[in-house]
Image (cartoon, grey):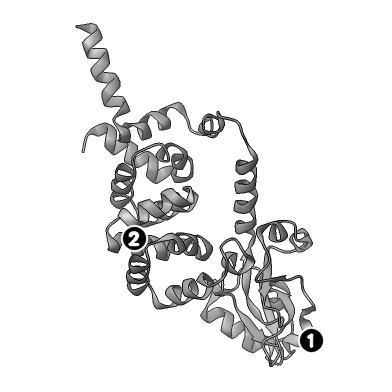
Amino acid sequence: MSLMRKLAQHAIETHPTQATTVLERLDQTKVIGALERGSVASAATIVERLSPQFATAVVSGARPAVAARILEALPADAATRVVRRLDPDLQEALLEQIDAARARSIRSTLHFREGSAGALMDPDVLALPGELSVRDALRRLRKAPELARYNLYVVDETQRLVGAVNLRELMLARGSHLLVDVMARDPHRVVATADQATVIGHPGWRSVHALPVVDFADAFLGAIRYRVLRRLEEDLLAARSQDADTAAAFGQVISAGARGLIDALSGAIEGDVGRAGRGAG
């Protein structure tokens, strides 16, 4: 690997989000090569920000072992977006290679219409029965802290969503109290079939960092993270923009040096050097 390509790879590793704008302009085989040489974490960050079609092409073209690791590292909603567009045979092959829990999460959201609340939600969110004590609930949380970021959701015996408890308030509550005694009743929620416009405009975002998703019987299915809302808002703004210089505007967040290094992946720098040599001759 040339020095400039090594430096370009370093720029991708250290600035994956900014690098995405430049990578979208490259041939997918070059992007696949760059992602396969880098860390899984930076590859997942880049794939999450790529356009849907390009992200699917990159994952499809990557070595299966690499593609599987990327799917495991992606947030649940992003992994579902990519898997949904894969060829059915490849889709099943990759799901067989990834962590069983992640595979179940992806499969559980695939049957929802693309862009719906059900497709956008993370199904791996902890919901516990209201008759459980605070002490027991905290014990469950310590075993799987990744299942609750801001709130713990409370369900009744039929799995209907009946409440939510802020994690800070839960830790301050008396251990002998029941969840039903400390929860906030009737939290904001959205039906799984709701479209993106409904999700983005939901009034619950004014007061929560995650929006619970329920079915028509009010049974708890999962939650949409605030990070997903921000992505939806960004996508909406991009879709409305008709400015042909949008890519250049995004490029302003990349330093001139980093841009030059990343462009080396497409041979731009080598080409400039060659032209300069011919001109000097």
The spot of residue 18 in percent (x, y) is: 48, 40
The spot of residue 31 in percent (x, y) is: 34, 44
Q: Nearer the viewer, residue 42 or 68?
A: 68
Q: Nearer the viewer, residue 187 or 238?
A: 238
Vertical position of residue 256 compared to residue 175: above or below: above
The spot of residue 156 in percent (x, y) is: 71, 89
Image quadrant where residue 86 sits: bottom left
* Labelled disc at residue 67: 2
Q: Nearer the viewer, residue 196 or 229?
A: 196
Name the residue located 33 percent from the left edge and 65 percent from the top edge.
Answer: 90
SS for callout 2: helix
Vertical position of residue 175 compared to residue 169: above or below: below
Given the image, on which type of amino acid does mark 2 rest? Answer: Ala
Name the residue located 32 percent from the left edge and 70 percent from the top edge.
Answer: 93
SS for callout 1: helix
Q: Nearer the viewer, residue 94 or 168?
A: 94
Number of marks: 2
Given the image, on which type of amino acid does mark 1 rest? Answer: Asp
Q: Say whether marks 1 and 2 touch (CB < 8 Å).
A: no
Vertical position of residue 56 compared to residue 128: above or below: above
The spot of residue 88 in percent (x, y) is: 37, 67
Which residue is identified by label 1?
A: 181
Q: Quadrant of the N terminus?
A: top left
